[in-house]
């Protein structure tokens, strides 16, 4: 973790992959999985995220947190879902 990261490991979970099989997409499975993980006081941070799915992550309650050096369109910051508490 870099020195510029304001999060301490005990305060967040890192989600590395969220996959829903094609036959179950659109049925609320991803929302239910993320909701199940969203217990307080933990923030959920995406370990890596595909910028093509930016809108999907927003719909699942995640918020884009720009990197201090982001320029418009860069999207090099963090995608995270705030703690529920």
Image: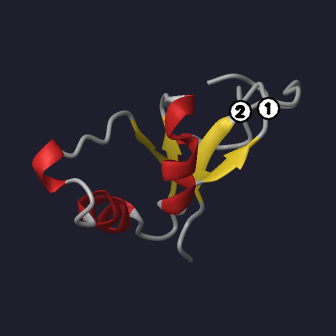
**In the rendered image, the vertical position of residue 42 relative to residue 75, given as above or below:** below
Q: Position of residue 81 (x, y in %)?
A: 55, 57
Position of residue 70 in the picture relative to residue 51 (left or right): right
Position of residue 70 in the picture relative to residue 60 (left or right): right
Q: Position of residue 46 (x, y in %)?
A: 49, 39
* Numbered tag placed on residue 77 in the rendering: 2
Position of residue 22 in the picture relative to residue 61 (left or right): left
Q: Nearer the viewer, residue 75 or 12?
A: 75
Q: Nearer the viewer, residue 41 or 67?
A: 67
Q: Identify the mark nearer the N-term, 2 or 1.
A: 1
Q: Nearer the viewer, residue 13 or 66?
A: 66
Neighbor class of circle 2 (other Cα within 10 Å; few <14, some 14-19, many 20+) is: few
**In the rendered image, the vertical position of residue 24 relative to residue 49, given as above or below:** below
Q: Position of residue 30 (x, y in %)?
A: 30, 57
Q: Which residue is mark 1?
A: 67
What quarter of the picture does the N terminus occupy?
top right
Q: Quadrant of residue 7?
A: top right
Q: Secondary structure at mark 1?
A: loop
Residue 21 visible from this viewpoint: no
Q: Nearer the viewer, residue 13 or 79?
A: 79
């Amino acid at each position: 973790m870099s020195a510029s990261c304001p999060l301490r490991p005990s305060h967040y979970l890192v989600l590395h992959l969220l996959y829903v099989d094609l036959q179950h997409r659109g049925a609320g499975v991803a929302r239910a999985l993320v909701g199940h993980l969203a217990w307080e006081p933990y923030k959920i941070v995406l370990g890596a995220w595909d910028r093509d799915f930016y809108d999907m992550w927003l719909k699942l309650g995640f918020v884009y947190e720009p990197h201090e050096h982001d320029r418009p369109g860069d999207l090099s910051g963090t995608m995270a879902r705030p703690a529920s508490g």
